[in-house]
Image: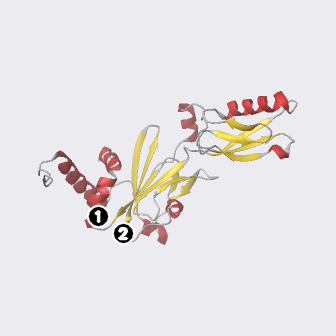
């Protein structure tokens, strides 16, 4: 039996068409914000408990005056790291201080007298940006050794925008203090120096919309969660 064509009044179809109309209006709207406030690190620390290490984090471990024990290790998918003398060691789920204490106890119980261990988290799994839409390599990218990138640098991480990109409609989503914010940027103006290159922070989502009208509905459907954020800023 041939599949039944969707009813003209299908809720999904109506929703998709509404999104199409809405996104089209957003793309041509000039009064959408063209800047975003930077996150407040001190404010976030007041609201957030101490960070707990997770898989993928990059950690620098030092033992005072023992250079041979210094290591830069990445937490594996099972939450483990490997250290000299003590071997595999559970790191995921611990705070930086808890991991320092655990490593200190492990070295001190068998190998060293009063070791002084310091742990520095160099790359956080939470400190990533998402680049999506009309780019060559969409995905999540860590902020390695930095607290932020510029928009052009973020797009370079995704190997640049594709030929279908609408360079005037690069949208950034940011959450600050639980409040979702959105702004649209014109990449052409940024590249020519007529507009500043905005900073992109960990947790930001960068979406490059497509210029081909035939692909607009497909883009809307692919980015439905983001459309809902658009709706919050109408």
Residue identifier under label 2: 164
Residue at horizontal 40 percent and vertical 53 percent from the top: 183
The disc at residue 229 is none
Q: Residue furthest front?
A: 1
User: Which image quarter: residue 153?
Assistant: bottom right
SS category of the residue bearing label 1: helix
Is there CB contact under 8 Å for labels 2 and 1?
yes
Circle 1 packing at 10 Å, graded few (<14), some (14-19), many (20+), is few
Q: Nearer the viewer, residue 171 or 106?
A: 106
Mark 2 and mark 1: Cα distance apart in space: 9 Å
Left or right of 133 in this view: 53 = right
Left or right of 61 in this view: 155 = left
Residue 106's place in the image compared with 194, above or below, is: above
Residue 199's place in the image compared with 213, above or below, is: above
Q: Position of residue 203 (x, y in %)?
A: 50, 46
Circle 2 packing at 10 Å, graded few (<14), some (14-19), many (20+), is some
SS category of the residue bearing label 2: loop
Which of the two labelled residues, at mark 2 and mark 1, occupies the earlier sequence position?
A: 2
Residue identifier under label 1: 215
Residue at horizontal 32 percent and vertical 59 percent from the top: 30
Residue at horizontal 35 percent and vertical 49 percent from the top: 226
User: Which image quarter: residue 218?
Assistant: bottom left
Q: Position of residue 160 (x, y in %)?
A: 48, 66
Q: Nearer the viewer, residue 96 or 37?
A: 96
Q: Nearer the viewer, residue 142 or 199?
A: 142
């Amino acid at each position: 039996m041939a599949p039944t064509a969707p009813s003209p009044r299908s809720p999904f179809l109506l929703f998709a068409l509404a999104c199409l109309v809405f996104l089209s209006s957003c793309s041509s709207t000039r009064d959408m914000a063209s800047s975003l406030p930077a996150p407040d690190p001190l404010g976030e620390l007041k609201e957030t408990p101490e960070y707990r290490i997770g898989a993928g984090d990059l950690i620098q471990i030092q033992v005072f005056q023992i250079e041979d024990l210094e290591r830069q290790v990445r937490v594996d998918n099972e939450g483990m790291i490997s250290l000299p003398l003590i071997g595999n060691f559970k790191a995921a789920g611990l705070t930086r201080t808890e991991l320092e204490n655990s490593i200190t106890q492990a070295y001190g119980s068998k190998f060293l007298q009063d070791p002084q261990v310091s742990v520095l988290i160099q790359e956080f799994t939470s400190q990533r940006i998402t680049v999506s839409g009309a780019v060559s390599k969409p995905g999540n990218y860590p902020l390695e050794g930095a607290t932020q990138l510029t928009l052009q640098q973020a797009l370079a991480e995704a190997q640049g925008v594709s030929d279908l990109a609408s360079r005037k409609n690069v949208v950034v989503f940011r959450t600050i203090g639980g409040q979702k914010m959105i702004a649209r940027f014109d990449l052409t103006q940024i590249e020519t120096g007529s507009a500043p290159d905005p900073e992109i922070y960990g947790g930001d989502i960068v979406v490059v919309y497509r210029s081909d009208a035939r692909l607009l509905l497909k883009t809307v459907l692919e980015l439905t969660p983001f459309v809902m954020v658009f709706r919050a800023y109408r």
